[in-house]
Image (spheres, coloured by chain):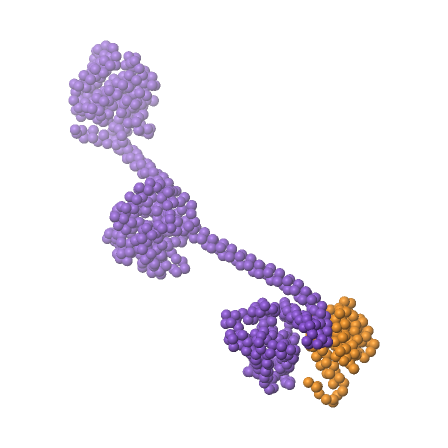
Amino acid sequence: MKTILIVDDEKNLLKLYEKEFTEEGYHVITAGSGPEALQKIQQGPLDLVILDIRMPDLNGVETLKKIMESTTKVPVILNSAYTSYRDNFLTWAAEAYVVKSSDLSELKAKAKEVLEKHSKAQQVGSAGPSD
Amino acid sequence: MSYPAELQMLSSGIDGLDQILEGPRWADTVVFCLSDWREYNAFLEPLADFLQARNISTHYIRFTERPASTSPSVSKNLRVHDLFPIESTEALGDELREVFNSNDTSTFYIFDDLSPLASLAKSDDALAELVRHIRLEVTHRKAAAYIAVDKNQVSMQTLAGLKDAASICVDVRSVDGTVHLQPIQVQGRYSESMFLRYRLIGGRVEPEAGLDFADYARTLERKSNEFLELYAQKRALEKDFQRSSFELSLINDITSSLLSTMNLEEILFRILIGVTAKEGLGFNRAFLLLVDEQDQILEGKTAIGPSSLDEALRIWTDLNTRHLSFPQLLASFDEEWQHRDIYVNQIVRKIRIPLRERSHLLIQLLNRMQPEIIDYRAPSQSNPSEVLKLLEAQSFAAVPLLFRNRCLGLLLADNLITHKEITPENLEMLQTLANYASSAIEHARLYEEVRSRVKESERHIRELETVQDRLMRSKKLSELGELASKMAHEVRTPLVSIGGFANAVLRKQRPDSEQYEYLKIIVEEVRRLESIISDVLAYVSPGIPRTQPSNLEAILDQVLFMMNTSFKTRGVHVSFLPADHLPEICVDADQMKQVFMAILNNAIESMPTGGELTISMSPQNEFIHISISDTGSGIPEDKLDKVFDAFFTTKSTGSGLGLNIASQIITNHKGSIYVESEEGVGSTFVINLPIAGRKEEVL
């Protein structure tokens, strides 16, 4: 079972994402801030991070930067209410950038795509993508 | 009657002065005011000789208290009358009348000293009365009289009365043995202090040594001529002065009138009125020609005046009945005036002569820059038939309109109706007027230029204000945009929660339950709000396209997948026919998704009862050609060019921004987008995206 860390300062969103991605069959852990997220990344192996950008203390872009600088090579999907951060080249290090929407299908599809891409990279020579 | 030649000669000259000095003149009554009695007696002798030599009968009248013992022996021609004025001057008058009546014309009367009569006289005026009486008789008979008065014996007042009464009064003075004859008054006019000196020699008065009578005559003649010349000059100056003061007041009237307006039309009118009005220069007609610097032509501008005698009489009578003063006449400008003198204005408008036609009379006049009278009747004039034909005049005056050594044009004037000759004075006046006229014209032109510059500046200022206004508005809009963007972002997060949870709960409901229906409404409405927010955000800040090699087919597939539910709900059948081996091109995948979504949403909206959606995608030359056709209601022809405008929408929902953003994105990608549509048949959106930016490696 893949483990996804979802980072957002909005409690309601965390609750929604946790429920939705759990129902999709993932193991979901959450963090309410950037520093908390960095701490959880340190603690255990993760398969994917879904990271909000506008957060107090340490924002998503800075958090992303720290993740990239760390030894953990966990893929990150940025998830923001803003489209404008895409113009910031620091966000390009993320695997994907998904604008927040009540329709979670795009985010779910992206998560699935990224996870598959990474497991494929880890198991060289395995079968191609299913779709 | 005729006079002896010598007397005729003596009668010439200036108003009697020379005659008194040189000899008697008929009809003169001369009073000599003496201080030394011997002077007069001695003076009478040469006179008597003079008269005797010419056989002129001479009477000598003496006033004595008793009969004279001896009569004067000066000449046998001299008849002596001793009168005894015992009772009064009135009685003396009767006696005198007898003397006069006893003689015919051409008689010379010499009177003895009148001063003894002064004591008899009842008033200061009595002697003057007597002299006046003598003068009447003398004038009547064409005789002449010399009267002596001892000025030591009479009052100043009596003397003054005598001066008035006599036709000539001479002050005789003797200083150092020389007799000075000083005319005091000649016919009430003469006041110059010319005098002749005689020397008393042995009791006789003779001209000063070395000078004879002829010399005196010549000297006097010369002096007289000099005087006459001076007098003529004085008269001419006086006339000049009168004319100048008339001209001055005329020019003053006209120039003050010219200065009171800056309207060129009105100035031209006033100039022409000044030239033609009876109180002005009094010409019959006047024409004004101005140089057009730009077109390099001399152009007839305007004219005034009658074209026939009938018209002239009508106009001049009309003017008389209007009783306008000259200044009023000058100010009587109205816009219609040129329509009254139609004929002359037709003539003047025909004048358009290029300045390079140097042989043309009018151009010659312009270049010569001096006033001239052109008279075709004069034999020396060559016959410039064109000008003659044009003006229909035999002669005219032409003056240049000079301003700072530049010739602005010509002022022509003639007397077509009255045929009055144009004098050099007329011409001079015309030139004076023209000089003022040209500065008025130039000032009006400058004023006009300044005014148009000011207008232009005002227009610039207005434009600046408009631009500033627009800037302010756009600043406001950008502030508004910022606010909208902030709000949209803030609203989006709670919408995600609302819509997300509603969707989660919705999945657990039976599709036929009430809760399912309501939750579905919440989910759909939230989606709609989110899409409006996306549109507004994209409009406010479309963002820089972050291009990377992308597969357009895959992007469109994703969009179709996302919108699958909408297609199904509306009963829209989608067929997507991508060409084989589509090259990857550099686009912003997210922005492309927006483009497709906008067009597909538009298609769905246009097919409420379902329909066919046909999508093709193929490389064509340097472009990828994408065509999206629906079988919807289509777009009315008059709305077709508004489809891509911001906030244009035919729907009651939606932001009206989707297609505008799509168009902006395609333009940012250096592509093109357009729509073809037929009402009731459907619409086709066509997108062309350049392949130029594609990567070498293809899928």
Can residue B560 be seen from the camera position used here?
Answer: yes
Indicate left or right for B530 with B47 as reference. right
- B316, above or below A84, in the image: above
Can residue B65 be seen from the camera position used here?
Answer: no
Which chain is the one coloured purple?
A: B
Q: Quadrant of residue B130?
A: top left
- In the image, residue B695 lies at what x, y percent? 63, 82
Q: In the depicted view, which residue is nearer to us: B542 or B195?
A: B542
Q: Quadrant of residue B92?
A: top left
- B431, above or below A38, in the image: above
Residue in the picture at 71% in, 68% down: B494
- In the image, residue B514 lies at what x, y percent? 69, 72
Indicate left or right for B131 with B437 as reference. left
Q: Quadrant of residue B207?
A: top left
Indicate left or right for B626 with B372 as reference. right
Chain A shade in the render = orange
- In the image, residue B341 lies at what x, y percent? 31, 51
Indicate left or right for A23 with B389 as reference. right
Number of disc labels:
0
